[in-house]
Image (cartoon, coloured by chain):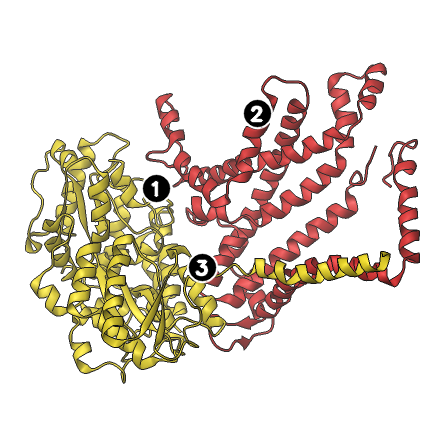
Amino acid sequence: MDLSRRQLLGAAGALALPAALAGCGGFSTSGGSSGGASGGGDALTFTTWGTDAELAGLRSAVSRFEESSGATVSLNVVPYEQMFSNIDAQIQAGNPPDVFRVPYYTFGSYAGAGQLLDLSSYLGSDVADRFTDQAWAAVQNEGSPFGVPHHTDTSAILFNRPMLEAAGITDVPTRLEDAWSWDDLAQVATTLRAALPDDQYPFAYNWQGNGVTRWLSWLFQADGRFLTEDLSGPAIDSDAGRAAVEFTQSFFSQGWVPPNDTISSSTYAQDTWYSQTVPLVWSGAFSIPDAEATLDFEWGATFAPQRVRGGSDFGGNALVATAGTANPELAAALLASVTEEESMREFCTGASLLPTRTDLVEQGIEFDVRPELAPVFLGQASTVRPQDSAQVASPDMAAIITVLQDQLEDAFVGGQDAATTVRSLSDGISDAVR
Amino acid sequence: MAPGAPADVAPASGEQPGRRRRGRALGGSPGEALAAYSFLAPNLVLLGLFVLLPLVWALWLSTQQTDGFGAATAVGLDNYARLFSDGQFWRSVVNTTLFTALVTPVAMGLGLGAAVLLNGALPGRGVIRSALILPMAVSGVATALIGVLVFDENSGVLDGIIRALGLPSVPWQSGGAAAFASVVLVTLWWRLGFNMLIYLAALQGVGPHLYEAATLDGASAWQRFRYVTVPMVGPATFFLLVMNVIYSFQVFDIVFVMTGGGPQDATSVLVTYAYENGFVTRDQGYAAAIGVVLLVLTLAFTAVQWRTNRTRDLTE
């Protein structure tokens, strides 16, 4: 009896082990089948994050592809916060999805590390031709396409009309060619600073966290570059670089932005505008539906300022296939399909995002919410040049982002002068570029 | 048995049963040992798989240069050599140490104080205990998000109150020292309940006869606290000291969400710096080296505590 009880307990322990291990196996957030690379057949796995509106557009595009091709696509939706630690772990484990969604500034680190499928031989020339030059440039690595530009977004200025009018500013640009110059912006900020109480500020800029790439818009407006044309070295140590640092640094010294509108701040510029601490904020079109649903003051959108030329951030996301996919043709066909005119139009109008297809850009699109604002954002996006978006697709962008964050924080919070900042940026980028 | 333990009680409850257990274990049948191991096995396997294996892996990784994709290049101790000349690493070491030195004694002191107050008869004792323990049940990220709401410079509750009182607002997000203080304050709020709970449990084990004897000997309230309570909760203090130090060295979520290590690295700690290297710039070998340094620091501190703390085994 004694012995059999021990045997029983031993057996119970042995049985508990796999159960306990299984309990610990709950790391995957995957809802569908895992392991795209092993999928084979006519099945693809597609990992993405997205807002409800984005997911509705994607699901509809995917079903259209499933109907036309007869393939099955299992769409695996994960929270953005987990997206890339998930993808990295899956790649490291040799078990990545066939297709995933990636921001343009992260695209390069996957493409440069040889983790993405070179689409040169899978996409017809008609696919390459459907995109704008700046969008196509954003998915290139060493001369070959490694993804398709699914959509873009860029920052224009959202304004709080009652706050502006209270300060006597009744006239905001309504055409791209009338966009404020840097001097005009300084004038507007000075007027607002004088009119607003101490705990309110003229504007807030959306360069928090990875949004630091949006600082580059100032550099582009001054007609500068941060990387050389072959993306092999720094090009920021220039008059344009110094002008961009000096002007943006003055936002803090002049009291034009709240002191916590820093790069590392946990308060996003958008929230500062929502709370009516500032009348102006730089923001992407993606926030229009939320702003329309949340805000009870009258607001509109105008163009970002220009200096030597217009310049803006090429935001948004690409869709890419992984190098190890068992179904490269099918994966490429999916990428081509979701960027067809109908799918892209539906996705962009529903989610308030901008198209990357030349035909849609030329025809214009209407957002479902606040359709009259679409031309402002389309106009703003037209100021992005291919050479600007190509730099952000650099495989070394992840390391460059850290350099930008550290040095700009030193300039904005620590008062590091523009010349030193630009030199340090140049040295940091030089180290970051492989 | 620690020196200074009451001679009349310690041997009876400590040594003899221990000797008896050892004797039985030595004479136990192989079957009994097998049963013991089968009970231990699930934990040992999990520990091996999710603690020891990653630990050895991290040690190996710290001698490599890799972005996590494809093959790694062996670089020997280069990653460690790089640490010496890395200003942001040293800033993170100083910040982590300062954070630990501030949070550990204050959290323990407040925890002991709250436990002593709530150990006596007090109206609404259960409610106050629950209110203090509740933050323990909140995740670190949620705690930090609450912290952001409180410490936001523009629309935060705290600066609102400070301004309403006519005082100058504090730059909780844009000033280095104030940002550091905000992280410390939120951590204290979060950790107070845990410290109080452990001390409360320890206080339940202190016999009332000790206080009676001390009172009869003419000890004041402070003397009873200092010479009876404090030594008698020694094992709990030792446990909390080690746990608080380990938690503080490992602080991540509060800092990551509240300040992101800024402004200007003023709140950058070792784990946020390792995260930045490992998952943002993908220098995973270097990040592993930072992790190993963190492990060595924590182990060294625990070893010192283990050897020097004299009351960790004190029992009634």
The numbered mark 2 sits on a residue in which chain? B
In the image, residue A301 above or below residue A65: above
Q: Could one spot residue A393 in this view of the protein? A: no
Using a 10 Å C-alpha cutoff, classify the residue at mark 3 as few (fewer than 14 neighbours), some (14 to 19) or many (20 or more).
some
Q: Which residue matches tag 1? A: A260
| Marks 2, 1 in one chain | no
Secondary structure beneath dot 2 equals helix
User: Residue most toward the front?
Assistant: A1
Q: Which residue is drawn at 63% across and 57% down?
A: B295
Q: Which chain is assigned red?
A: B
Q: How far apart are marks 1 and 3 (CA)?
A: 35 Å
State if disc 2 and disc 3 touch (CB < 8 Å). Answer: no
Q: Which residue matches tag 2? A: B128
Using a 10 Å C-alpha cutoff, classify the residue at mark 1 as few (fewer than 14 neighbours), some (14 to 19) or many (20 or more).
many
In the rendered image, residue A89, in percent from the top left (x then y), is placed at: 47, 67
In the rendered image, residue A178, in percent from the top left (x then y), is placed at: 6, 52
Q: How many marks?
A: 3
For the residue pair A52 and B226, the one nearer the viewer reads as A52
Q: Residue at x 49, y 62 (%)?
A: B278
Report the mark closest to the observer, 2 or 1: 2
Amino acid at dot 3: Thr
Q: Could one spot residue B295 in this view of the protein? A: yes
Determine the colour of chain A: yellow
Amino acid at dot 2: Ile
